[in-house]
Image: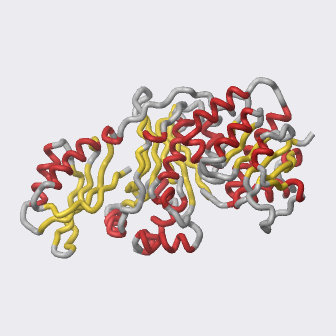
Amino acid sequence: MGVKLGILGLGTVGTGTVQLLQDVVGRNPLLQEVEIYRVGVRSLAKIRDVELPADVLTTDLESIVNDPAVDIVVELIGGLEPARSLILQALKNGKHVVTANKAAIARFGAEIFTTANQAGVYVMLEAAVGGGIPVIQPLKQSLSVNRIHTITGIVNGTTNYILTRMQTEGSNFSDVLADAQKLGYAEADPTADVDGLDAADKIAILASLGFDGRINLEDVYCEGIRQVSKTDITYAEKLGFVIKLLAIAKQYTPSSPLSVRVHPTLVAKAHPLASINGVYNAILVEGEPIGQVMFFGPGAGAGATASAVTSDILNLVAVLKTSTTNPNPLLTCGHQDYCEIAPITELVTRFYARFLTKDQPGVIGKLGTCFGNYGVSLESVVQTGFQEGLAEIVVVTHDVREGDFRQALTEIQNLEAIDSIPSLLRVL
């Protein structure tokens, strides 16, 4: 008896998945148990890179999730609706679901997993984070005995590509973005990527698995890369750093609230994430007793994502073949409670700040005094040069509570000698 798949969507990832399922030679023998039974598409007329019998294709996606013959529904249409409704309907009908949809899982995970648990079926989401990199199953299984304290990732290929090009070419953000759009590395509307929203969805999912609780997406602090200038990249370089958009989930002590955030970050060149360039992704997991584990690979693309989707399908085929009635606790998502997430003002971190000041004596002294008033200790203060008659001063702090640092900045902004604070970045 073959396992019947209903695939929703035949775009890049859907096509890659079908190609992988059709080319079984030299791969896991379980693939031969899989039958592509129905595939839902927008248009039957479109010319496709895969050959499927005409009766397999349909434009009626609801008919697939309601078809009693379908064992596994593979949701690859993306977006929030109708993806959410179709996933929920499939689960209510007792079908397992494989999805690559990080936006739907990050927003509606509670509803989706509750529905799956009630129906006694599984939702598999390896492809939702990190493209082809196996990170979801390792967090659920191999690493689940560890007390995880930090997950730090470069999980958005578009922004990593843009920052890498800015770093290597000395170009500015808008030029590289325009070029990335031409090359197809960035969407026509790049908001989700460059404003950090895509990375926030992904770190919410990783944090939920690593810290065993639900994450409210609204609690995830999110800042994108639009304000990162080539000037900052140059200064970062001189100070021994590179700038990366990092997604971070951290728990300082086992009982403290989580810090979950996405923002551009100065990363020391010796750090393992500093050398992850271009469209590649990497996720660094730190915990007890394992120490550090890093997952690295292509974060997007038809082949990479299809690899993750198909590995989830095979996991489910193995479950259906051994068909015990008891759910496998390593495949379910059992947590009901929401994690407590600390506000960003409570974050303790180092900062990099760049000031433009009037060229008058004693400015650095005044900066130092204001910072001192709020307990901000400075690691380095450098006057770097002049821009249009204004002196440029770059400051790197020691660890400081973000709220205290912001209060110091408010006071500094009111100083007569300060023209502006063009950039402010956190340091890992």
Q: Is residue 8 above or below residue 90?
A: below
> Residue lying furthest left in this view?
361
Is any part of residue 73 visible from this angle?
A: yes
> Can the viewer see residue 16?
no
Residue found 17% across the figure and 48% down from its top: 371
- Colouring: secondary structure
Pick the residue in front: 373 or 225: 225
Residue drawn where x is 53% and y is 33% of the image: 214
**Residue 397 point in image, percent of width and height:** 25, 51
Q: Position of residue 205 (x, y in %)?
A: 55, 41
Q: Residue at x 42, y 49 (%)?
A: 222
The spot of residue 250 in percent (x, y) is: 44, 39
Q: Which sits in the foreground, 9 or 211?
A: 9
Q: Furthest residue to the right? A: 1
Q: Position of residue 335 (x, y in %)?
A: 58, 28
Q: Quadrant of the N terminus?
A: top right
Q: Is residue 91 left or right of residue 249?
A: right
Query: In screen coordinates, is 403 left or right of 137?
Result: left
* Residue 388 location, quadrant: bottom left
Q: Residue at x 31, y 65 (%)?
A: 235
Decide which of 313, 78 is in the foreground and name it: 78
Question: Left or right: where does residue 271 sit relative to residue 86?
Answer: left
